[in-house]
Image (cartoon, grey):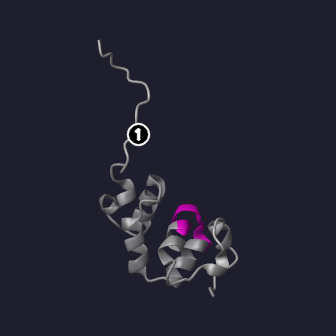
Amino acid sequence: MNNLPEFIKPLLWDVNIANLNLNLDQKFIIERVLEYGDLDSFNFILKTFDKNTIVNTLKTSKKLSTKSGNFYALVLNIDKQELLCIQKPFTQKQNRFNTTSIF
């Protein structure tokens, strides 16, 4: 059972909310709020989870956008260089059309 407020549930559109556990799924919930949430949902995670858990999720998440990472690094006073989501992408974009000639 979970005690998620109604305004958080739309952020979790692709999962069965009845199966979520606030302790076991805290990283997932925090990531969704940081990426898609508003001020109310951010205040909810601040009240619900330990600040160190939120900061650690922000630092280690590969699912957050660069924009969200930069914003919350400023809000939580974290050096943005510590965030994985801001580092060089883990996968390289492939160029489908080689612009250099082999001849």
Mark 1, residues whose alpha carbon is within 10 Å: few (<14), some, or many (≥20)?
few
Residue 71, x across and y down, in percent: 46, 60
The residue nearer to you, when weighing 75 against 60, is 60
User: Which residue is drawn at the image coordinates 36% and 66% (left, top)?
Assistant: 59
Residue 92, x across and y down, in percent: 37, 42
User: Which residue is drawn at the image coordinates 37% and 68% (left, top)?
Assistant: 77
Above/below status of 25 relative to 62: below
Name, please, the residue furthest toward the front.
Answer: 103
Magenta region's main secondary structure? Answer: helix
Question: Label 1 amino acid?
Answer: Lys
Image quarter for residue 40? bottom right
Image quarter for residue 79? bottom left
Q: Over which residues does the magenta segment extend?
A: 32-40
User: Which residue is drawn at the image coordinates 51% and 71% (left, top)?
Assistant: 28
Name, please, the residue furthest toward the bottom.
Answer: 1
Above/below status of 58 relative to 24: above
Q: Is residue 14 left or right of residue 74?
A: right
Could you tell me which quadrant the N terminus lies in? Answer: bottom right
User: Which residue is drawn at the image coordinates 67% and 72% (left, top)?
Assistant: 9
Name, please, the residue furthest toward the right.
Answer: 6
Residue named by callout 1? 93
Residue 103, x across and y down, in percent: 29, 11
Residue 102 shown in magenta? no
Residue 33, x across and y down, in percent: 55, 68
Residue 38 shown in magenta? yes
Q: Is residue 80 left or right of residue 48?
A: left
